[in-house]
Amino acid sequence: MRSTTLAASALALVAGVAVAGLSLAQPMADAPSRVATPTAAKTTILPGHWEYDYRIGPIPAGSETRCLKPADVEQFSRGICTRKYRCDYTTNVVQNGKIRLKGAWTDKKDRVAPVTAEGSYTPESFKLNINMKTINGLPLAGTMTAKRLSAECLPDQTAAK
């Protein structure tokens, strides 16, 4: 039971990056060069009111809604990360409707968790298949799907941000 709870928590960390006030990207300051898309402005996803659903394997692990601002949309192409980790992607490709990430997350104690994610996106939806090993070596696989519900955020979402 504890392993299942730990796995659910770890996937929530990975999958919840775009939901619970977490950054979609926070690369390490001294990260080596990485394969990336050009820095020119490009369309990925659109700002607005979004809904996210998470699964660990076939098991639903939760769903949430969030207001994505233009700054959140800009971060989408930089890869997934949480504020608790330094994230370095040796592969970071977000272009032409496809997402491919490979790298590692390092916690404050310098413990490393390898992470890969692949998926697809449109301006109003995306899906990521996420695979990782926790810092304790527990393999974890899950999915995050998201869809844009409207162009406008709910008043309580914009006030809270």
Image: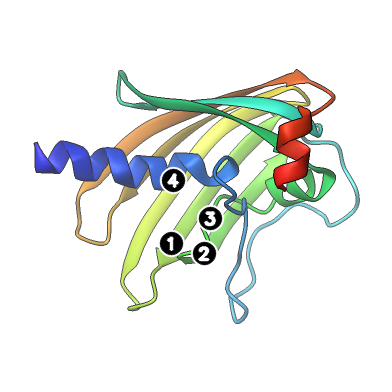
In this rendering, position of residue 135 left or right of residue 11: left
What residue is disc 3 on? 81
Q: Is the residue marked by circle 1 packed among few (<14), some (14-19), or many (20+) residues within 10 Å?
A: many
In this rendering, position of residue 98 left or right of residue 16: right
In this rendering, position of residue 158 left or right of residue 87: right
Q: Earlier in the sequence, mark 3 or mark 4?
A: 4
Q: Are marks 1 and 2 in contact (CB under 8 Å)?
A: yes
Which residue type does callout 4 highlight? Val
Q: Nearer the viewer, mark 4 or mark 2?
A: 4
Of the 4 image quadrants, the one containing the N terminus is top left
In this rendering, position of residue 47 left or right of residue 149: right
Q: Nearer the viewer, residue 33 or 124?
A: 124
User: What distance separates the C-alpha of mark 3 from that of mark 4?
Assistant: 7 Å
- The residue located at (31%, 44%) in the rendering is 9
Residue 84: x and y, percent?
Answer: 46, 65
What residue is disc 1 on? 104
